[in-house]
Image: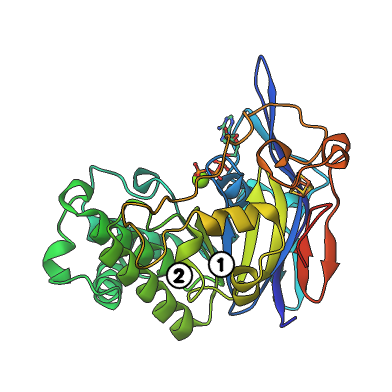
Amino acid sequence: MKDKILEVRNLTTRFHMVNQEVTAVESLSFDLSAHEILAMIGESGSGKSVTNLSIMQLIDEPGKIDPDSQILFKDGDKFIDLNKLTEKEMERIRGDRISMIFQEPSASFNPLFRLGHQVGESLRLHGQSTKEEAYQEALKLLEQVHIPNSRMRAQDYPFQMSGGMLQRMMIAQALACHPDILIADEPTTALDVTTQAQILGLLKEKQKETGMSVIFITHDLALVEDFCDRIMILYAGSLMEEGAAKDVISSPMHPYTQDLLRSIPKPGMFKAQDKLFAIPGKVPDPGEKITGCPYAKRCSRCTAECLASKPQIAEKDGRKVRCFHAYS
Ligand SMILES: Nc1ncnc2c1ncn2[C@@H]1O[C@H](COP(=O)(O)OP(=O)(O)OP(=O)(O)O)[C@@H](O)[C@H]1O
Ligand code: SF4
Ligand SMILES: [Mg+2]
């Protein structure tokens, strides 16, 4: 593997509610290399956002990251464990070294301030520039993310922007401090297909220009083949499969990955007799106690063995899979 920039080891994050405990992410381990685009994929509730909010140390009560979890981030020539930093130390990393485009735009922007001002303020927060310098820098960033009439649009408030334009603004804000890692949480979900393609193109362009690493979160496997280097498939807070994007798409080993791929519409489909495959059943309820494989209830290959215990991850030739009956 190329130079690693992030090593996550046994990440477990739970929410301790009055009436139940939800394990949102369980013993998750993965690496991110320098200049790599890693896709994190899974249905709603699989733990994608919580994993990345844990990396950012943005888990609030009643959530708690297990103190034994390690989030090792390369800082110069050594790794520091983000899970051991104080909030003050973490503020030096967050936004500056690791940026996140949040799933919810309202988490990134204050509705009461003009967008140019807000992008400028994030520059000022992490840099030494004056207000005017930061604003001019923000205008340059808006141009770089291809916002037409950027000088005028900088005067707009968030509600005046279309979904696609607001995503561009969020990318501009996230790029402001030249982060080593950009985490993009479902940045294209609410957008039409053409705008989705433009935003992915923009992210790729910026990744190439800056050399940053990207964690790209989506529930849409169809989006990522050409965009990402590597894919992680999550289900109910656990890793199910991981490998090079082209390998996972062309020869998926886990029944869940296979089912996700079967649910993608193919070109030329939608004649009267065509029926799109839908994965039967639903994801486990938060807080549900599962003894066997988390996917067992929906899996066509499920056997007694799968119900009795949770399969461990098997690793071979740069691929990982968690299944007793994986395809090979
Ligand atoms: N603040 C919270 N309090 C309680 N449970 C939470 C909280 N945030 C997340 N969870 C639970 O953690 C689990 C993982 O949630 P997460 O938001 O990471 O899913 P996701 O994969 O990002 O889903 P989506 O595609 O819908 O964004 C879910 O079961 C969710 O209900
Ligand atoms: S372990 Fe069993 S139930 Fe789980 S995915 Fe594999 S075959 Fe299906
Ligand atoms: Mg999410």
Residue visible at 56% across and 54% down? 260
Q: Is residue 115 left or right of residue 48?
A: left
On-image quarter of the C terminus:
bottom right
Q: Residues within 10 Å of mark 2 (few under 14, many from 20)?
A: some
Describe residue 182's horizontal placement relative to residue 288 as left or right.
left
Mark 1: amino acid:
Arg
Assess mark 2: CB under 8 A from ligand 3?
Answer: no
Q: In the rendered image, which quarter contains the N terminus?
A: bottom right
Q: Say which element carries label 1.
A: loop
Occupied quadrant, residue 62? top right
Pick whichever, 263 or 55, lies toward us: 263
Answer above or below: position of 141 versus 70.
below
Q: Is residue 57 above or below residue 147?
A: above
**Residue 244, quarter of picture:** bottom right
* Residue 247 figure quarter: bottom right
Q: Is residue 242 visible?
A: yes
**Decide: marks 2, 1 in contact (CB < 8 A)?**
yes
On the image, numbered disc 2 is attached to which residue?
A: 177
Left-right relation of 193 to 247: left
